């Protein structure tokens, strides 16, 4: 049996039992994809993260699994892994992650926050299926703005106000049936609370997560969108899920730094064959 340490990290929050609960497994050597998937199903949380040190200095292979299988990117998972490594006193002020999609993600400390830098992602446009709007309970003609990100397979819908964002109660089965070309729907608006610049919610039943508590990687698109909308160089977003969480966003010329607070809630040891 292989023994390895795991941590349950509440990401994008400085409060316990808030933010996105993220199991991070620290491996000495890689596990099979089948075992990692089984462990993700056992944890039964949005995403389980596996990191293995690579031959490159301060570099780690990172993989992400939901209950339904492997996904190529996960912002809150990377943030949780970065927090563990950067605050253990051994990894210095920077660590590099290598996901299976071939990218390299640089994580750094910024005071009490941890940041992960993502390449800037561009918007594209596609028609919203009428059945998808029906599943969300919204009128497509009343949507002020929407766009798509091909790399993330994500549809972004800007609503009129924060109350309409909070009021959405999706029919998740109908969402799944409405399209096979979208894996996540993000609804958002400017914030009525002046503490935050915008609020959002994220629905991704296509990958086994009905509503994501807090989402990270989508801000590789949203950082520049809201920078242009609000004419601000630094942004603070609130994810209005049941748990809630705060996302710090710094759009740069060709990348976006996505940051947040984290808290370790459980440390343990797992056995895996």
Image: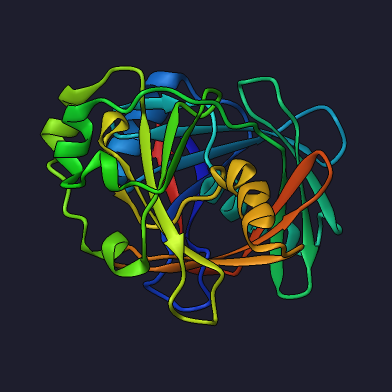
- Tell me which corner region of the image, top left, top right, bottom left or bottom right, holds residue 105: top right
Viewport quadrant of the N terminus:
top left
| Residue 238 position in % (x across, y down) | 47, 67
Q: Is residue 266 something that shows in the picture?
A: no
Q: Is residue 42 something that shows in the picture?
A: yes
Please give the name of the residue rendered at 29% of the width and 69% of the height, measured from the top-left corner.
163
- Tell me which corner region of the image, top left, top right, bottom left or bottom right, holds residue 85: bottom right
In the shown orientation, is residue 165 left or right of residue 157? left
Identify which residue, 11 or 24, lies in the foreground.
11
Viewport quadrant of the C terminus:
top left
Please give the name of the residue rendered at 54% of the width and 81% of the height, measured from the top-left corner.
195
Please give the name of the residue rendered at 64% of the width and 31% of the height, measured from the top-left corner.
122
- The image shows residue 68, relative to residue 242, as above or below, that is above
Identify which residue, 218 or 58, lies in the foreground.
218
- The image shows residue 153, relative to residue 266, as above or below, that is above
Please give the name of the residue rendered at 84% of the width and 44% of the height, measured from the top-left corner.
253
- The image shows residue 170, relative to residue 166, as above or below, that is above
| Residue 215 position in % (x across, y down) | 47, 51
| Residue 261 position in % (x across, y down) | 60, 69
| Residue 108 position in % (x across, y down) | 79, 56
Q: Residue furthest front?
A: 141
Q: How is the image coloured?
A: rainbow
Identify which residue, 19 or 185, lies in the foreground.
185
**Total count of labels:** 0
- The image shows residue 28, relative to residue 92, as above or below, that is above
């Amino acid at each position: 049996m292989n023994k390895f340490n795991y941590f349950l990290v509440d990401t994008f929050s400085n409060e316990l039992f808030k933010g996105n609960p993220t199991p991070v497994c620290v491996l000495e050597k890689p596990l099979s994809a089948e075992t990692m998937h089984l462990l993700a199903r056992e944890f039964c949380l949005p995403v389980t993260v596996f990191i293995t040190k690579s031959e490159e200095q301060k570099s780690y292979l990172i993989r992400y699994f939901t209950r339904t299988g492997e996904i190529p990117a996960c912002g809150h998972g990377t943030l949780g892994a970065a927090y563990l490594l950067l605050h253990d006193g051994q990894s210095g002020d920077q660590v590099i992650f290598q996901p299976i999609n071939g990218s390299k993600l640089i994580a750094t400390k910024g005071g009490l926050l941890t940041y992960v830098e993502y390449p800037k992602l561009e918007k594209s446009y596609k028609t919203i299926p009428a059945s998808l709007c029906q599943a969300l309970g919204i009128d497509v003609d009343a949507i002020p703005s929407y766009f798509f990100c091909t790399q993330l397979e994500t549809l972004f819908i800007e609503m009129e106000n924060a109350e309409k964002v909070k009021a959405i109660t999706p029919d998740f089965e109908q969402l799944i049936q409405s399209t096979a070309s979208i894996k996540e729907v993000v609804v958002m608006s400017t914030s009525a609370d002046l503490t935050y610049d915008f609020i959002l919610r994220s629905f991704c039943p296509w990958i086994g997560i009905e509503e994501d508590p807090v989402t990270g990687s989508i801000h590789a698109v949203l950082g520049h969108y809201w920078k242009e909308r609000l004419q601000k160089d630094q942004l603070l977003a609130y994810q209005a899920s049941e748990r809630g969480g705060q996302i710090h966003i710094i759009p740069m010329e060709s990348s976006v730094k996505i940051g947040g607070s984290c808290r370790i809630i459980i440390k343990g040891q797992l056995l895996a064959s």
